[in-house]
Image (cartoon, helix red, strand yellow):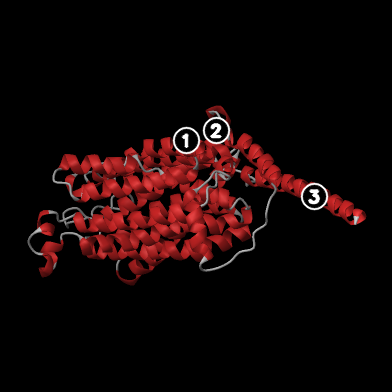
Amino acid sequence: MIRSFGVPEDDIGFWAGLAWGRLSDRIGRKPAIIFGLAAMLSCTIVFGFSTSVQMAMLTRCLVGLLNGNVGILRTVVAELVPEKELQPQAFSLLPLAWNVGSIIGPAIGGFLSEPAQKYPIAKGGFFEKHPWALPNLFIAAISFIGCLLGFLFLEETLPAYRRRYDPGREIGKRIEALFYSSNSQTISKTSCDLREAREHNRSKPLTWSQILTPSSIRMIILYVLVAIHHITYEQILAVLLATKVHPESDPISLPFHLPGGFGLTTSQIGLVFSVIGLNQIIAQLGLFPKLARKYGVRKLLLIPAFFDPVFYLLVPYTLALNGPVLYVAWGILIPVTSVSIVCTLTSCVILATNTAPSAGALATLNGLSTSFAALGFTIGPSLFGWLFSVGQKSELSILPWIGLSTVALSMWIWLPKVEEERSNVDDENDSEATGTDSEDNQSNGESGSSEALTFGTN
């Protein structure tokens, strides 16, 4: 819908991710997430009832401005699963959900949009006046479910606020008790107070100089570069597939002039990207965790970074192929690039998370990387779309692909210094566990002394 208005709104995410990541370090993860979902719910409903370009643009911008949950959710995953051996599986869940939504979402949107023109039962009246209301109401319903589930069952993961009274969780625990019972250990009030004090001291928001360590800056730069060349690749690929086959008056002239495209229909392009999405789901769910356990996250970033520039340069040369050879070439390119996207993006997120100096800096760091990546999402497709047009009008049609390869190669400026770092959040949890064990031992000792005294008196 917003694309039909010709209005770019991606740059709104730059400020949203930065502001909400920093705020969640101060007020807690759960309030920020629930507020983001509630804001999305409200703005989406208004967006569905938009009657002008200005109204649609304003509400769409508000969705991006008031919802910075991408970076916060990564932080929650990092705090829930600090163990490095479990991070590949945990950090695969968010991209997996995104890929599933990317496949299902457009289908649902297409099915529900403009129902008055598609279904006789919806002709006239409400849906005639508001053709975009139904899909947006459906999205709002999903947001409401997410908001409700978060209110009832989401635990606060920011250490400073883990002991804060949460009415939603109290209700959620009662609901959970209807289905199963759990054995809970009682902790002395003194022990809770000591642990809460330690957590509060560790979780105070840090200054920017403390957050932006050399390792953190390096990983943010790499994440932005990865986001730019992978997202731009998918955008330019869609343009290449849609562009008409070159006319006879403008033939292919190797090695640098391969004009035109494949001339596919929108349905065929949708099928291609559905296959790409399916490949990414398989790679995210079944391949990445196993490879990360065997080779480590750092290698899963380095290996694709070596092959990406090569594959980008090979893509335009498939225009010179015909018959079975063409299908074999794309049968190799699609799975390999899909695995590369999964490995590099997920590896960058994990490595960037592990560079956080403490749990109190996680959301700010994730918000910062998400913000700059959003800026890259805006600049990359626009710049390389322009290069694609320039290349088609000149004798250097592979110009955008050379540019993509250059961006991918630039990662090697920072890649050699990337280390498989131990998570600082894991270190803090280890310290907390040690402190807890000491307190428990002390408590057990006091309890034992009391029992011995009572026994002796008896």
Separation of disc 1 and disc 2 at Cα? Answer: 8 Å
In this orientation, which residue lies closer to the viewer: 353 or 196? Answer: 196
Mark 2 crowd level (few <14, some 14–19, many ≥20, 10 Å Cα): many
Residue at 47% of width from left, 49% of height from top? 73
Q: Indicate the amino acid at tag 2.
A: Pro
Disc 1, SS: helix
Q: Are dots 1 and 2 in contact, CB under 8 Å?
A: yes
Residue at 51% of width from left, 63% of height from top? 176
Q: Can residue 217 be seen from the camera position used here?
A: yes
In this orientation, which residue lies closer to the viewer: 358 or 313? Answer: 358
Tag on residue 22?
A: 1
Q: Earlier in the sequence, mark 1 or mark 2?
A: 1
Residue at 44% of width from left, 59% of height from top? 96
In this orientation, which residue lies closer to the viewer: 373 or 245? Answer: 373
Q: Indicate the amino acid at tag 1.
A: Arg
Q: Earlier in the sequence, mark 3 or mark 2?
A: 2
Where residue 97 sits: x, y (%)?
42, 59
Mark 3 crowd level (few <14, some 14–19, many ≥20, 10 Å Cα): few
Q: Can residue 227 be seen from the camera position used here?
A: no
Disc 2, SS: loop
Q: Are dots 3 and 2 in contact, CB under 8 Å?
A: no
Name the residue carrying label 2: 205
Q: Indicate the amino acid at tag 3.
A: Asn
Disc 3, SS: helix
